[in-house]
Each structure stands twice: as structure tokens, then as C-alpha cells.
Image (cartoon, grey):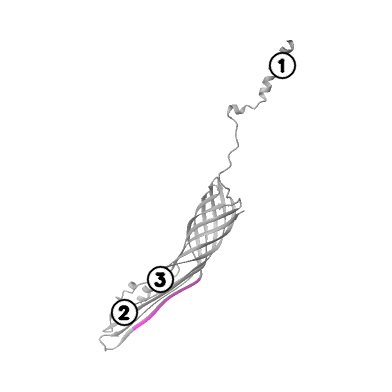
Amino acid sequence: MRSLIHGLLLASAASPAFAGDIDNAWLRGSSSFPADPPSYRRWSGFYGGGQVGADFYGIDFRGVVGTSITTISGLDANFAGIPLNDFPRLSTMNSKGLSYGGFAGYNYQIDDIVLGLEVTFNRATLNGSMSDKESHSYYVSANGQLYATTFNVITSATAAAAEYGTIRARGGWAVGSFLPYVFAGISVGQVNTSSSVNVNYFGTVTPAGGNPPTIGGDWTQSQVSHGKWLYGFDAGLGVDYAVTQNLFLRGEAEYVQLADQNDIRTSIASVRAGAGLKF
């Protein structure tokens, strides 16, 4: 009995120290479990890749005639009262073609928000031309005579671009392996343009006879520009998909507007696919 009592006393004396060695933090609710991993990929860093797409070109020739007609109209008094500006003019045209190129940029990521700067370069096949000839007859009083006169306006214009590129800012939202984004920036393209406006007229005295028997004239205004780089703006949206930590696929739509040259305006709407590597 004495041994049993001594054993109980020793056990009770040791129990506080033993209890102090037990981690009972879980009883107080203070245990911290490991945080769940992010539900999105990391996109930070430099990247680059290639792309191919379909370009839909718009060429606006409507501005070609106005300035030239105004200039020519002031060169001969017999143009007074002749509505040359009402003669039908050039219009717009659309075409399409393939393009290919590359892109490179840098992403900075804050949680699931991704901001970046990117440059692109594409080879293009923009090429278009348009011409028109309009003739109208008027009676013109000149030199004390009345003339039956025909006025002709002949116009033509061309535009071609072999390459264009952009510098653009991007903003995206990482969702799982997807990165949908929007972008806007500056566009630049090398565009060749030419335009020509010819106005001529010829009139004979009516009724037949009189002196002088005829009147007439011929004037041409033309402009040609080759190899010039034009600036503009671009905007669009797209989505990147991370196949692996370093490889991603891309799809996007873009609109590019370039500045006027020789009163000709060009624009490009594109849909494209690409692939890239994140470094």
C-alpha cells in the first residue's frame, strides 16, 4: 500500500510538466493551416512569340478629289458656275489578306491583375486602287459667245502597305490558365500612296459659227508618296492560355488606324492566332 501511495504522489507531481509539453494550441483555435495555392498562373516576366492572322483592309479614297478640284477651279474663269465638286468622286474599298509577324513584351503581375507593355510587327498585303471618269455638259458664256461645253473629271488613286506594327499597353486578369486582356497603343505602318485628278473641258460656239470657234483647257494635280512611315492608334482584346509554365497560346482581335497620306486613309482590322514563350 505504501508503494502505491508513493507512486501516485510521484505521478501527480510530474503531470504539470508533462501537460506543459503537450501542444494543445489546437484546443484554442490558434493553429494556422497552410494557405491554398493561387488559382491562377504566374505571368510575370519577359515573353515573345509569333502570330499569323487574317487582315481586313479598309481604304478611304473619298478625300482625294476635294483639295485638287478646289485648286484647279481657280485656274480658269470658265470654271465659274460649274459644280465640279458635285461630280461623282472616289469612294471606299475593302479587301482582305493574310499577315504574319511576331510580338515581344513584359508582364508585371499583382495577384491576379497583369499589366504589361508589348511591341508587335506584322507583314501585310494591303493593296488597292480606284479610278473614275465623269463627264457633264454645260453652256458657257465666254468671249461674247455661247459655247456648248463638255467638262471631264478623271480621278485615280492607289494605296499599298507591306508592314505595320504597334507599341501597346496591356491590362489582363489571370483566371486559372487563362489571361484575357485588353490593349491600346500607337500604330505605325509604311504606306505607299498616289493620287491624280485631271480636269479638262472643250467647247464649241453654238449656234455654229462665230469667232473664236472653240474654248478648252486641261489641268492635272497629282501626289505620290513612297516609303513613308505613318503613325496612328490601335486597340483590341485577346486571351492567352498557358499550356505549360513557359509555353502559351494566343488569340486576339485588333483594329489599327493609320494617319492620312495624300488625302487617303487606311485601316486594318485583324483576327489572329499565335504562340509564345515566357522566360
Please provide percent x and percent y for residue 250: 54, 56
Mark 2 or 3: in front is 3
**Which residue is label 2 attached to?**
78
In reply to whether residue 206 is colored magenta, the answer given is no
**Is the residue marked by circle 3 packed among few (<14), some (14-19), or many (20+) residues within 10 Å?**
many
Residue 259 spot, x, y in % from top left: 46, 64
Residue that badge 1 annotates:
10
Query: What amino acid is labelled 2 in the image?
Result: Asn
- Where residue 103 sits in the image (x, y, percent)? 56, 59
How many callouts does the rendering have?
A: 3
Query: The N terminus is located in which quarter?
Result: top right
The stretch of residues the image draws in magenta is: 216-226
Earlier residue among tags 1 and 2: 1
Q: CA distance from mark 2 to mark 3?
A: 23 Å
Q: Which residue, given by chain and number where applicable, does mark 3 sit on?
A: 64
Amino acid type for the residue under numbered disc 1: Leu
Residue situated in front as seen by the camera: 144 or 130 = 130
Asked whether residue 223 is drawn in magenta, I would say: yes
